[in-house]
Image (cartoon, rainbow, N blue to C red):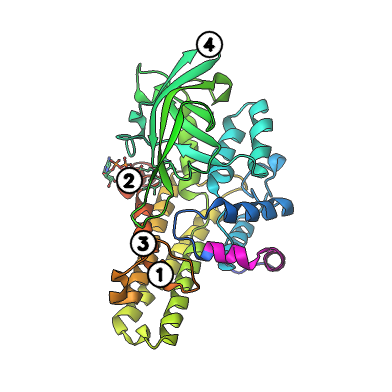
Amino acid sequence: MHLDLSPADLAFRDEVRAFLNENLSPELRRGQRYTTGIYPEPEISGPWQQALRRKGWLVPMWQEEWGGTGWSAAQRFIFESECTLAGAPLVHPMGVRLVGPVIQRFGTAEQKRHYLPRILDGQDYWCQGFSEPGSGSDLASLKMAAVPDGEDYVLNGSKIWTTHAHHANMMFALVRTSTEGKRQDGISFLLIDMDTPGIEVHPIPTIAGDHDVNQVFFTDVRVPKANRIGAENAGWECAKYLLEFERGGGIFSGRLRSQLKRIGDAIDELRAGGIDVRADPRLVARFGEVCADLDSFEMFELRVMGGLEPGQNPGPVSSILKLRASRMKQAVAGLGVEVLGPQALHWSEAPGQGDSLLPLLVPDALNSRSFTIFGGASEVQLTIIAKSVVGV
Ligand SMILES: Cc1cc2nc3c(=O)[nH]c(=O)nc-3n(C[C@H](O)[C@H](O)[C@H](O)COP(=O)(O)OP(=O)(O)OC[C@H]3O[C@@H](n4cnc5c(N)ncnc54)[C@H](O)[C@@H]3O)c2cc1C
């Protein structure tokens, strides 16, 4: 594997750095740095999304016709790593990374013309309505009924763990349109306007006290059939395609590295207050282990991404990326708690009010528990790896 950057890649890296210097304001950097939930709030991710859109760098992985950059894997890696190392906010992925590619692949010409520009300019903020109470890992058992009635479907049921549903004006959802035959063959993929009468969003506080996830209730909600992506009962195909992007469509190592740096900064903060945790050899050894793991994960990620054509997604190997990235996330966040030691027993539900990084470490570690659950639990990823990658 060739790891040296070519002169063209180095020039590209300099261009990215210059763009970040010019466009990444201290407020946006701070917004990302003090986020402990899954995604930054829209007032942080939104302005950054617009800066990237103006530059034409918002959707590198899309088809060029719709705004894709046609970048090589090396360029994608450079771009994402530079953004995360500079502390840029995470762009809310639901539109850009998840439903956008599905609409491009399975949508009608009219659906593409309507939805794709709205994702780009941030008019639509999306949430994902896949999981239901009792249907998470076993997603194909989902029950939310969509009954045809004239030009519409009438929806009744509930979706759960819906991240940022309280901010979203649109949801992409899997609904049951048939109970005949194989369960996967009775599911359709619908785009739902969250302002439709009959939709109620109820918050579910996370273990750290953040408001990231919700339960969404549907009572006689009318959704036009024109909002269906793909054929009726063919939604499973869209869902499988989308999940590959959810599990492996991004570059995680840069983000993990910047979180590790945040812990390094917290160590400096403690030192300034008279506590030098670097004197603890066990902690230093643990730090070394996590750094080595991160290096190896980064190499693996580069190898997978290096094999992709522009616009291509990684396929079932994305389960390996998802499994390793989520475990790394917990290892990095766990280090933060070890750095705090007994101080970790006290933590606040509203960190990020002052300048100290220390109050962020415990909420970050608590929220990191969810990384091995959302997007498909680790046990489920292991089964996919065994069946589809290893072939047992
Ligand atoms: C913070 C957070 C955000 C989320 N955001 C969204 C969202 O925006 N949209 C959305 O649709 N969903 C979302 N989810 C839901 C997430 O996808 C599900 O929680 C996940 O798929 C697991 O489903 P479950 O919670 O029903 O657990 P279950 O499926 O009941 O699993 C419970 C345990 O059993 C294990 N298990 C289950 N089946 C198997 C098996 N076959 N073999 C071995 N072990 C198994 C699991 O690994 C897990 O440890 C989110 C979840 C979290 C925690």
| Residue labelled with disc 2 | 386
**Whole-number angstrom distance, CA of label 1 to CA of label 3:** 17 Å
Q: Is residue 141 above or below residue 150?
A: below
Q: Nearer the viewer, mark 1 or mark 2?
A: 1
**Whole-number angstrom distance, CA of label 4 to CA of label 2:** 44 Å
Residue range in magenta is 10-32
| Residue labelled with disc 1 | 359
Please tell me which of labels 2 and 3 falls first in the chain.
3
- Residue neighbourhood size for the residue with mark 3, other residues' Cα within 10 Å, grouped as few (<14), some (14–19), many (≥20): many
Asked whether disc 4 touches disc 3, contact meaning CB atoms under 8 Å apart, the reply is no
Q: In this view, does 71 lie to the left or right of 342?
A: right
Q: In this view, does 63 lie above or below 221?
A: below
Q: Which amino acid does label 4 sit on?
A: Gly
Q: In this view, does 34 lie above or below 282?
A: above
Asked whether disc 2 touches disc 3, contact meaning CB atoms under 8 Å apart, the reply is no
Q: Where is residue 119 in the image (x, y as percent from the top left)?
A: 63, 41
* Helix, strand or loop at mark 1: helix
Q: Which of marks 2 and 3 is in front?
A: 3
Q: Which of marks 1 and 4 is in front?
A: 1
**Residue at 58% across / 56% down in the picture?**
44
| Residue labelled with disc 3 | 330
